[in-house]
Image: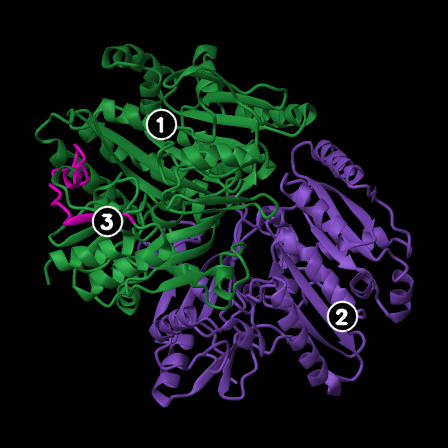
Chain colours: A green, B purple
Amino acid sequence: MSFSDQVYQELAAVVGERYITRKDFILAGNRAKTPEMPVAHPSAECIVCPATTEEVAEIVSICLRHDLRYLACVTGCIPSAYASGPDTVFMHLKRMNHMEINVEDRYAIIEPGVRHVQLYPEVRKHGLSYAAAAVGPGGSPLVTYAVTGGDNHVQYGASRPCRYLLGVEMVTPEGEILRTGSLQTDSGWFCADSPGPSLRGLVRGYSGNNGKLGIITKCAIALDQCKGPAEIRREGISPHHKMFMDGDCSRVYVFNYENIQDVCDAMLALGEAEIAATVQKYFYLPLTLMMTDSANDFFKKWEYCKKTVPMPLVVHIATQSPEEREYEEKILFDIVHETKGTRIPRDLEMWWEEHMDYFMIVTRLQSVLRLGGSWFPCKASAESVQHMCDIGESISEFIYDFTDTGKIFDAPENYQIIPMEYSHFASSELLFMWDRFNPDGFKNMMEFMAASSATDAKYFYHGSTSSGYGPSAEKKGKLYSNAHIWMEQIQKAFDPRA
Amino acid sequence: MLFPENTAQVQEIIREARKNGKGLVPLSSEPPHFHGASENANAETVCFSAMNRIMKIDRRSRYVRVEPGVTFGTLIPLLAEHGMRLNLPFLARAGKSVTTSALEREAILIPKYQYDYPDPLLTVETVFGTGDVFRTGSAAGPGTYEQNKADKVLPWGPGTIDYLRFLSAAQGTIGFVTWATLKTEILPSASRLFFIAADNVGQLNSLANALIRKRVPDECIILNRENFAAAFANDLAEEEKLRQCAPWVMLCRVCGFDRYPEERVDIYSRYVREACAEAGLVAETEYPLLPNLEERIENMLTDCDRRETNWKLRLGAQKELVMAAPPSKTAAIAEYISQHLPQTGLSVQPQVQGRAFRIECNLRFENAGEAEKYEAALFELAKELAAIGAYFDRPYGRLSELVYTEPQSLDAVKRIKKIFDPDGILNPGKLCF
């Protein structure tokens, strides 16, 4: 069945005329394509803005009844956030922006329209914090925690969002409202797992379902005690700002390494000693981009950074007393000495100190990446610190074919490894960039991704995870315990149109 | 009773049962069994005692991989030889399966190491009710178990589903686990155990919350007088002496590791004392109700219960009720139990970084013939506790009547069951199946 005036009226009856539109200029603004993706997004038939879970459920039921596609969107950062075919109802969830912080039980209940820029300052007022993914202040914490991925720069002393997602309320593809965890028995939001086999397993695994098994309309996320100073003093206005972590309990150190296996040894030793709040091997290309305001400025600094910090290990110490800070520093310097690290020049280290708040670490990175050209991540995976470092080491086997020929930007060490749970695991990401005006850019990107996958396949490295449904997922799923078969069965069980 | 020795035999048993429409119930721990999950009159028992290999101990990446027949009694000393330890339950039975304990979300003693409810369970291999073998998280692939070069420690996935959570607390109704990878931690080089006495549980509950959010304690548990005496005494005479303790006692251990261990212990001890002072409490390192009691308790906190008679059964029999609660409701729930069943033993354990507590209520009695009477009393109590916020996420026996009442989630969990055990042969009749 196709979209009609009657359907429009049914949807309007749910949300009210004020919160539905099919004006061309608004629809056009919601089919934007990303510059690096040669995919044109068709227009949605209408945009509807529900305010409650019940309204979302009614909209899904209407779409189901009239056999229409629908999608839910908040930030629109990824291509799957846009219509991909005709007869699509576009649900914008920006009106669902309520939040509630439970300080004693350390969780926040959030709706999809809540942004980091709203939640984070409120949480900090209570001396609490959460693992904010590197999406910038406009990102939706609910999306990070329940719908997509969520590696973040403070996970060394914490973990991935998978660990912090508690009770969830969602609308299933059948238009029913499903509650998971302790919500299931009306026992509040505090517990992630349902009684017995946990329905939380449906909500997300390594990454989220991007809405395929339901629209998450509300969830609780666990909060941690804030590490570091209670207040971060700031000078200037973003992006030309500096921040200062005052006090005797917080210090930032950056070391350079020549060899990823030495970095691995350092990360594992730091984790065993249970010291430091943040540890990461950061990518040096975005680091340089963040320090610059123009392409000319970038190229001036790039040769220096490339030579001076090809493999930076960034450590933030945040303790409860100066005495503990000194104790941690003593261990840190022992470990760095043992693992052959060297402290980077003070001018570069100072930049880190003055620009990283270690919570919303890449508030500026997203804009800089856009200015810098087209980019894409690969090796976006997680496993033990050792395995991630082995994967990092294997990158040199294929990357020079692309950097030496100008197919991608010449930054062969541009991958990050961030330990989590005091180095029990780590996540990795190889970020590569190319000239967006190069007509072969997309083709080169695909070739590079294929080369990366081929290396993982050759060594049976866990450099990516099985994902997706249907025929395209089959090849990979076969290598991952036939995960594609189980995923497909789950989707069929919960989505009548799967 | 069937005794498989490997995964292929488990597959064969399940396929055969499907063909014949027979029920199967898994059993991994040695007796006594407290919850009845492994007893099923409508099913043949599959005993995993012969699958007791320790497949891997990895000091560098801090994990251990074991088959379900491996018990705490065997594993704890072996890990110590490698300088490692498990995040243990409180006085687990020596014959308890390490895998089952983690699968059943038993409370652990060191909340700072627990980031999520299934922790310390990382990955598992399972045979579903279809007879298919599946590995969870990064153990899934790429390739076979042998080909996959990962350490197989990452719990999530594969892909967008968290399969481990379908198996957690499932009482063997979704799949039979044939090995499990568990997180291990470094064995401390120095430690100090504190005894913090209080008149009411609320004071200790708040103290635990304050300390754990700063990651200060390693082991941390709050016991009422009855459970303190029962757990640490070796006989009834000692129990009487230990009943002279305060109404509530919190045990809090701080540790130092390989590098400058004493320095860390001193710094963290100061934090404990400061937090106690702020709460109007005192952290003592001596508790001289019995000679060398301090040393005995520290040893018991870091080991399993190797005594011939389990502490819960010293009187003859026991029934227990296990629940979870957020910090804000824990004290009220514990006080309610104390008021309504004054003779009951209570253990209150901070979990998942202190964001939740597990409350275990132990009702010990002499006459095993009265078990039904006590079970009924606990069930009535559970109904009242649910009304004030207790959450029964491990619904053994009749507790399932309390938790499976909401139609949408009940329907959803049955759909999951249908996928992984289409013929309903795995532990039939348990939970809501």
Does the residue at mark 3 contact the one at mark 2 (Cβ under 8 Å)? Answer: no
Residue at mark 3 shares a chain with residue at mark 2: no
Q: Residue under circle 2?
A: B340
Quadrant of the drawing holding the C terminus of chain A: bottom left
Q: In this view, does B388 lie to the left or right of B125?
A: right
Q: For the point 41% across and 70% down, which residue is it?
A: B413
Q: In this view, does A402 lie above or below A73?
A: above
Position of the N terminus of chain A by quadrant: bottom left
Query: What residue did someone put label 1 on?
Result: A283
Q: In which quarter of the image is residue B7?
A: bottom left
Task: Name the subunit of mark 1.
Answer: A
Foreground mark, 1 or 2, reads 2
In this rendering, does residue B145 appear at all? no
Point out the stretch of residues depicted in magenta: A26-49
C-alpha separation, residue under disc 1 versus residue under disc 2 = 60 Å
Amino acid under disc 3: Glu
Provide residue B22's location: percent of width, then percent of height.
42, 88
Disc 3 versus disc 2: distance between alpha carbons?
56 Å
Image-based side of B80 in relation to A83, left or right: right
Helix or strand or loop: what does disc 3 sit on? helix
**Is residue A47 rendered magenta in the image?**
yes
Give the number of the disc on residue A17: 3
Report the Cα–Cα distance between label 3 and label 1: 48 Å
Q: Where is residue A415, by image quadrant?
A: top left
